[in-house]
Image: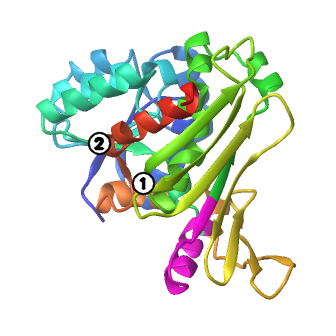
Amino acid sequence: MDKTKVLLFGTGPMAYEYAKVLKAQGYKFIVVGRGQDSATNFRKKTGITPFIGGAVKFLSTDSFSSYKAIVAVTGDQLGSVTISLIKHGIKSILVEKPGGLDQEEIQHVRNEAKRHAVEIFIAYNRRFYSSVITARGIIKEDGGILSYHFEFNEPGYKIAQLEDSIEIKNNWLLHNSSHVIDLAFFIENQPKLMNSQISGSLSWHPAGAIFTGSGISKTNTPFTYHANWLTPGRWGLEFMTKNYRLIFRPMEKLHVQKNDSFEIMEVKIDDKLDRDFKPGLYKEVESFINGQRDLCTIDEQFEHLKWYTKILKGS
């Protein structure tokens, strides 16, 4: 069995999903939470009793520099907990997306990571969907992507009712929609040029509600995007190759349209891990512990921030 030891920070729903994966993979891990109620619920679900009192208190009890850490706390605590781990000497950290409350905090995490020579990875689990792995194989065999399109529609009326803080809601593209945008840039490449337009507004997101744009990736592949948070819609991506239109809608599934047909067919994929665990999470944790392949680095996230800003502000 691998001797890697893991610290898991958080006792909410996402931390539960990580614990489920870590147990299945046979790793020894310690769970650290803040409040009693959440810790009690976590213990009932997993049989694991978390340390209660938060990251700073826990880290003061011993040296944990030989451990890897997974940060699955609430969005407004991601940055502060990660920085505490960096300063404590932990050298490899997987932090839930987007890696901080806002762009300023993500930049601060990146700066501290560089100063202390720490590896930080952002947990975009959709990179590890079985549908995505299958599609990347098809794309490679068919000679690459000729163009692509992505949509990050959000149910504005539902988000307005969530208990998330106003800071989280104001940064909703970063905290939620970035799942789609990151995946688009991961499968193809991030832009070298992009034109963006915004319109509309919402009470919880006055900066905009309709986002449209187009651009060219670093590999000279044209793309377009669209999102309307005022109307019905869902996330989706489409990648066009010489012989296929590859469709992720929903993203856990892969559908294709062949160049000699109008029919859209579902591709059979081996998605057992995505059914037994939160989709993508098993392979994401496996990658983090065993070699970091295909994970989003903090530097990559920092590069993406300028494109997220452009989408939000228009140009």
Judge whether 180 appears above or below 279 on screen: above
Judging by the rendered image, the residue that carries numbered circle 2 is 299
| Rendering coords of residue 1 (x, y %) | 30, 65
Q: Secondary structure at mark 2?
A: helix
Marks 2 and 1, how far apart in space?
19 Å
In the image, 285 versus 241, the foreground residue is 241
**In the image, 212: left or right of 229?**
left
Dominant secondary-structure state across the stretch colored magenta: helix
In the image, 168 versus 31, the foreground residue is 168
Q: Quadrant of residue 2?
A: bottom left
Judge whether 268 appears above or below 176 on screen: below
**Camera sees residue 166:** yes
Residue stretch in magenta: 131-148
Q: Residues within 10 Å of mark 2 (few under 14, many from 20)?
A: some
Name the amino acid type tagged 2: Asp
In front: label 2 or label 1: 2
Judge whether 168 appears above or below 307 on screen: above
- Residue at the location (54% across, 70% down)? 133
- Magenta-colored stretch includes residue 217: no
Name the amino acid type tagged 1: Val
Q: Secondary structure at mark 1?
A: helix
Q: Quadrant of the C terminus?
A: top right
Q: Residues within 10 Å of mark 1 (few under 14, many from 20)?
A: many
Judging by the rendered image, the residue that carries numbered circle 1 is 285
Q: How many marks?
A: 2
Q: Quadrant of residue 42?
A: top right
- Specify the color scheme: rainbow
- Residue at the location (17% across, 24% down)? 87
| Rendering coords of residue 90 (x, y %) | 20, 36
**Camera sees residue 47:** no
In the image, 221 versus 91, the foreground residue is 221
